[in-house]
Image: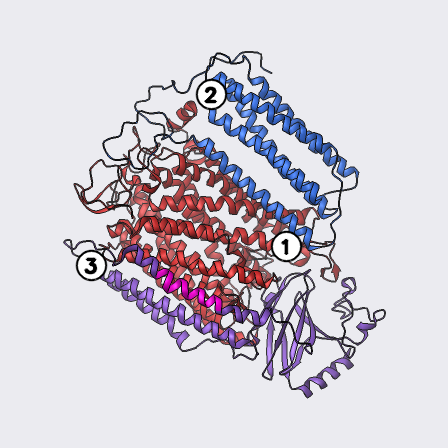
Amino acid sequence: MAKIFAVTIIVIAILSAIPILRHTWDPPADISTHGARIDEQMSETMAEAGISFLASQILLALFIWKFANTRPEDKIKTFPGGAKAVIWAAFLLVGTEVLALGVFGVKAWADVYFTPPAANAIPVQVQAGQFAFYFRYPGPDGTFGPLHPDLISEANANFFGLDTSHDQDSKDDIVTAEMAIPVNREIHLLMHAKDVGHSFYVPALRVQQDFVPGLDLSLHFTATQIGKYEIVCTQLCGLGHYNMKAYLEVMSQEDYDSWLKKQAALQ
Amino acid sequence: MATTVPEPPKIEERRDPPRLGIDSGNGGRRNLVPAGGDLRSVKDYAPPPASTGIWVVLASITMTFAAFTSALIVRQGSALDWRHLSLPRILFFNTLLLLASSITLEVARRQVGSFMSGRRDAVANPARWLYITLFLGLSFVAGQYVAWLQLRAQGLFLATNPNSSFFYVLTAAHALHVLGGLGGLMRVISRFKRSILRKSTLDATSLYWHFMDVLWVYLLLLLWIKL
Amino acid sequence: MHDMSAHAAEHHAPTSFIRQHVFSLDHKVIGKQYYGLALVAVLVGMVLSWLMRIHLAWTNYPIPGLHLLSANGAPGNVMTPEYYLQLMTMHATIMVFFVLTTAPFAAFGNYFLPIQVGAEDMPFPHFNMMSFWVTFVGFLVLMSSFFVSDGPTLGGWTQYAPLSAIGSASGPGQGTGVVLWATAICIFCIGQLLGSLNFITTTLDMRTKGMSMWRLPLSAWAWFITSVMGLTAFAVLMPATILLILDHVAGTSFFVPSGLVLNDQLQPHSGGSTLLWQHLFWFFGHPEVYIAIVPGMGIVSHILITNMRRPMLSHRVLVYSMGALAVLSYMVYGHHMFLSGMNPVSSLAFSFPTLVITIPSTIIVLIWMGSIYGSKLRINTASLFALGFVSMFISGGVSGFFLAQPSIDIMLHATYFVVGHFHLVMAVAAIFGIFGGTYFWFPKMFGRMMNETLGKVHFWLTFVGAYCIFMPFHYLGIAGNVRRYQAFVDDYLQPLIPVHRFITIAALLTGAAQLIFLYNLFHSRFWGKPATGNPWEATSLEWSTPTTPPPHNNFGDKLPEVFHDPYQYGVESSTGDYVMQASPEKVKSAHDEA
């Protein structure tokens, strides 16, 4: 039975590795400017994890194979180097590797979080609420009008609680149910939660960030490929969580300008 | 209050009922002749479990109040709705009651301890000081309730503002633990009356009580500075 | 020192049925009661997972009989989205608290820790009895949420605010359901704190003559380390649940900020901190998962050593590594919050201890493997589950490399990758520890052997089945499959649905295989082959009891005296290749403590 067990472990380990090696279920292609570093982290970690996984499972299997079928007269042997070797191996093979990954990963993280948005980044506000995302563009005046939570009304399609009769800045704000952005332009995304916790996730854009009620958070990114992508909610927000999504359309500058004009007319 | 004098102290060291050789754990005083092997790092005597146990209890209570403290600090920093409230005056009087009860408990502990070990200078009725401690403790809890009433008179209820919320929560949590301590004291008194009190139980209960004291002083400072 | 008269009450074994089997002070009975509770809990949790998996694979199909479970939740036998989330929340809560914390720690620990240290019982048997019954009441309160009109809470076992704190406006089950959940967990914490009290004092104060700390078996060390973690972790979750309950029933705003609008209504709360809940919860939550796994590590080490016929490569290094895991577990909790909106510098700060914690984990695995090298490995059901634990822990641990890095977490947070990771290390590895412990200690607890053939069949189906279920979770996560979705409606998720169907079928088959274990458990209890006192030829004190099962005071007339380190295997002796801890026989070729 030991031999069958050992073979099973090896088979399972190899079968597990196959979909990874064949890239059967990969994340969608990266369409962001900052994503390359994230993808690189991912591949390096996958290589390290994959090697550790395969090596240890195979070693475990080999040891089980060899030492479960000893004869009564076989003596007990100590692993060469004993516990010291094990500790060194743990520190050198795993410890230094993962710490290196951590150090290199700082740059990938810093690209997202420690760089300020560009001065000419297009500001877009996204509001997450049960169970939809709504977007707001500042309009020609470039400023967002203030939010009045007490004025929010789904029935009147006043999703953000804007007071266009009293607030000058709100008059030209453009509220949409879809997000469109021009390609190769940096976007400064201002995130606002209406009710409970939500999250903003676009796998292709290599962006994910929680909305935190009571906190004003923001992200910035640049999309490099035209296309239609899904924004999905990843923070459990209630019964409609699975269905909470919006489309992100990355367009050429001209298409974006005409889209924005059209949306403004619909307000 | 008892007027009868408890039975002559049963001195634990000498009490060794014949027990068919049943040992009572490593903490018991037994004949510890090594059996010829080498007993590396073995102590012949382990502390009575109650004295280790009480530190375990105090550690977890500390963690609980640490969690409440961090909740308070974070909550204060998360919004601009912190409204300072003036602490009800009676709190300071209650503090004195609690501190006094610690002193009376220490007196009681020493007197009961010397009574139990049969020393000649032992007082006839050491339980008296235990009763006084009990009374002071109950007065403290009653005083805390009065503090709540005073706060209520100011229009400050549990949900009025975050300060009042924390006031009620922290004082209630502390008072609950004090009630537990009172229960422990009553148990000590009852066992003493029946001459089955262990020194370790008395010491552990006293330590718990003193900790309630220290905890209260900490909370009072926290409430005073933060609220 | 024991109070002599209370002692007398314990020493004379109770005679009434209630005193013997219901309100028992005997740690062995309490351990069995905990095991029974965990068994009921795991069956409930498993059925919930079947319902979840069937719904995920065939979303709008009716599940026969489901409307009997909940008319609101499954009209026409089709599960509503909210009911899925409610089942999911209950599945996780029941499994994490009432199975993974209860069985390896409270069940086996209560039964065997006092025996392994050489004591008659734990020093505070009344608190011990209370700890079980309090935990049991917690379970009942949790289960009662199935029967309230709005159903159980749907906020996940993590109950993030404000969803958890704002009240019923945020969804079905978010009113009474949350209050019941929080109350149940608060009660559970109290029960576990009482348990920790006993475990710590037993280990420190109740060791018999000759039993130094370094002579404790690894399972005893694991229970001790776990109980210290439990002391601090549960003591933090309890106040958090109290504050959550107050937000619900008293109108406070600890966790709910102002300006929130639900159903077009401005909510009356103000000023609370959403992240405060996450910090409090995960400060508990991360040590909790180590509480779930460390006893398993101790049990597996113990079983492996007996079946390898040699001690570990280094006993002390294993103990220090488990201790290091415990200490580090408090410093890493922010890795659950990388994208939570907390300061991104904090995210980096938390990621480094998370990466460092791989080192003691690796040391432990390598020590196990290095000890298998050169051993005389015996294969039986217990050792198979122990070896399976090692394989599962490697698999689950390696996926941690990804999740420890915030930059990668951007892609993998809240996806099935995380679900795969924690299921492998907790649901599978920890459960394997429970199974291994059961097969190993059953003869001592009940005087009968479990059926080996059935045991091996159970092992094979579970081992292969568990990999079939949980390995694909990682691929789903890499592809961006978000978790806690009751259905997959997004365009990019459609190609992944066949994978979910494969997983569901594997889950149902593996679940069915557990019936073999149940049958084996109950059949062997009454009709299993009678066991000798030491069927595994093991050395630790539980195998030295005068009778099997052990008598009421564990060791009868005389407490044992310990003469040796816990794992004197591979030595020449009168009994074979081992010398028991309680045997005065001198060891001819001693294995010194490394």
Magenta-drawn segment: A89-103
Q: Secondary structure at mark 3?
A: loop
Tags 2 and 1 touching, CB below 8 Å: no
Q: Which mark is residue B196?
A: 2
Q: Position of residue B39 (x, y in %)?
A: 28, 35
Q: Quadrant of the C terminus of chain A?
A: bottom right
Magenta stretch contains residue B124: no
Amino acid tagged 3: Asn
Residue C93 seen in the figure: yes
Q: Secondary structure at mark 2?
A: loop
State the blue chain: B
Q: Position of residue B97 (x, y in %)?
A: 66, 27
- Residue bearing mark 1: C174
The crowding category of the residue bearing disc 3, from other C-alpha atoms within 10 Å (few below 14, some 14 to 19, many at least 20), is some
Of the chain colours in the picture, the one used for chain A is purple
Amino acid tagged 1: Gln
Q: Is residue C316 above or below residue B184?
A: below
Q: Is residue C264 above or below residue C251?
A: below
Q: Quadrant of the N terminus of chain A?
A: bottom left
Question: What is the CA distance from the residue labelled 3 to the residue labelled 2?
Answer: 60 Å
